[in-house]
Amino acid sequence: MSYTATFDTLEFAKTLEAEGFQPKQAEGLSKALKQAFQDNGTKLQEELKGSKNELQDELKSAKSELATKGDVLSLKVDMAALEARLIKWMLGAIIGTGGLCAAIASLFATFSR
């Protein structure tokens, strides 16, 4: 992509001459202004290209930090295993609590006779 200045130097020079500039002054100013536009356009292109490259690098870096489908599947498997362990622990606690309540009830029944 190259920058092309769309600056009508002849029209600009005619405008300057109409405002009182000498023909050589008007022509010189037109050429200098056109060159300045071209230089600035080239610099802008270089800066944009550098910014584009930086953004592409940052995007690649961000993509590498994202979780993959394999990562998500692995987490689901781990969560299912933890859920199974939690259910086993809770059932054990419920059965143990029930047994403890039955033992206490049996003791009260024995002492209350």
Image (cartoon, rainbow, N blue to C red):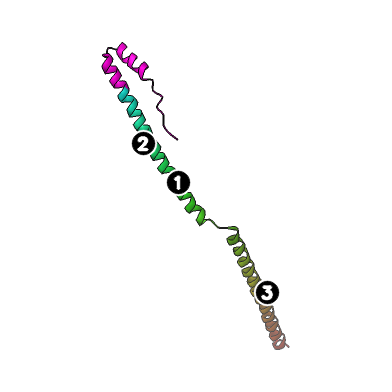
Q: Nearer the viewer, residue 110 or 15?
A: 15
Q: Which residue is mark 2?
A: 43
> Tag 2's secondary structure?
helix
89 lies left or right of 21: right
Whether pointer 1 and pointer 3 mark residues with C-beta atoms closer than 8 Å, the reply is no
> Tag 3's secondary structure?
helix
Q: Nearer the viewer, residue 20 or 2?
A: 2
Q: Earlier in the sequence, mark 1 or mark 2?
A: 2
Q: Which residue is mark 1?
A: 55
Q: What x and y, as percent, mark residue 112? A: 71, 86
Mainly helix, strand or loop, the magenta region?
helix
Q: Is residue 65 above or below residue 13?
A: below
Disc number placed over residue 91 in the picture, else none: 3
Q: Residue at x 61, y 67 (%)?
A: 78
Q: Earlier in the sequence, mark 2 or mark 3?
A: 2
Q: Nearer the viewer, residue 40 or 93?
A: 40
Q: Amino acid at mark 3?
A: Leu
Q: In the picture, which quadrant includes the N terminus?
A: top left
Q: CA distance from mark 2 to mark 3?
A: 72 Å
* Residue 40 highlighted magenta (yes or no): no
Q: Earlier in the sequence, mark 1 or mark 3?
A: 1
Whether pointer 2 and pointer 3 mark residues with C-beta atoms closer than 8 Å, the reply is no
Q: What segment is highlighted magenta in the picture?
A: 1-30
Q: Amino acid at mark 1?
A: Leu
78 lies left or right of 95: left
